[in-house]
Amino acid sequence: MSIQHAYNQWAEQYDFNDNKTRDAEAEVLRKLLSPITFNACLEIGCGTGKNTQWLYTKASTLMGVDFSEAMLQQARNKIQDPNVQFVQANILEPWYFVQQTVDIVVFSLILEHIEDIAAIFKKAANTLQPGGYVYVGELHPFKQYTGSKARYINEDGLQVLTCYVHHVADFINAGISCGFEVKQAYEYFDEGDANTVPRILAILFQLK
């Protein structure tokens, strides 16, 4: 099943399923980005708007991009604001949807579906103003090592999405190769227990 089709199917139930990864990443995003000031935000993989609602309280303009039109419709139902725009697009293709540079590009639980993340970092770098930020919040590769993947249940049973394992060094090196430096890294552990496998890896990059 294609990623686009899977998320179109998942859209109506996405916000209501028991999903520790979704909820943990939302918490981590707020923790890392609360101290950051930004005006123009590009959110890649905005989905149902789970983070958009918070991001647009900080930004003066926001564009949310997703491959799934059904997920975007859920986001549009939540947010009607002339300064928030939602766009359906495949981010593997040229980013023609970007008309001006932004202060921050946000990736939440999307890069696990992308094989070549360095190419995506390059596009983000070309989109940012000097000194702009990239936030990455993903299922931790250590969690992936145990077999954890994006999944949901529909009338046909368990649906497991196509995912790629990107190691911690892969994220860091992809960013460095495109002119970024790491400003902060954070690992989220369930119940705050650092003796367990971390669930979320979050990295804040800044363009040099």
Image: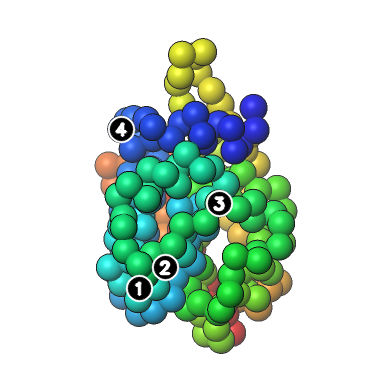
Q: Amino acid at mark 3?
A: Gln
- Residue under the point 59% across and 38% down: 4
Residue pointed to by mark 4: 16
Q: Earlier in the sequence, mark 3 or mark 4?
A: 4
In the rendered image, residue 162, in percent from the top left (x then y), is placed at: 63, 34
Disc number placed over residue 59 in the picture, else none: 1
Check if mark 3's residue and mark 4's residue have beta carbons within 8 Å: no
Callout in the foreground (3, 4): 3
Disc 1 crowd, CA 10 A, few/some/many (<14, 14-19, 20+) = some
SS class, disc 4: loop
Q: Earlier in the sequence, mark 2 or mark 4?
A: 4
Disc number placed over residue 88 in the picture, else none: 3
Q: Earlier in the sequence, mark 1 or mark 3?
A: 1
Alpha carbon distance from label 3 to label 2: 14 Å
Q: Earlier in the sequence, mark 4 or mark 1?
A: 4
Q: Amino acid at mark 4?
A: Phe
Disc number placed over residue 12 in the picture, else none: none
Q: Amino acid at mark 1?
A: Ala
Alpha carbon distance from label 1 to label 2: 6 Å
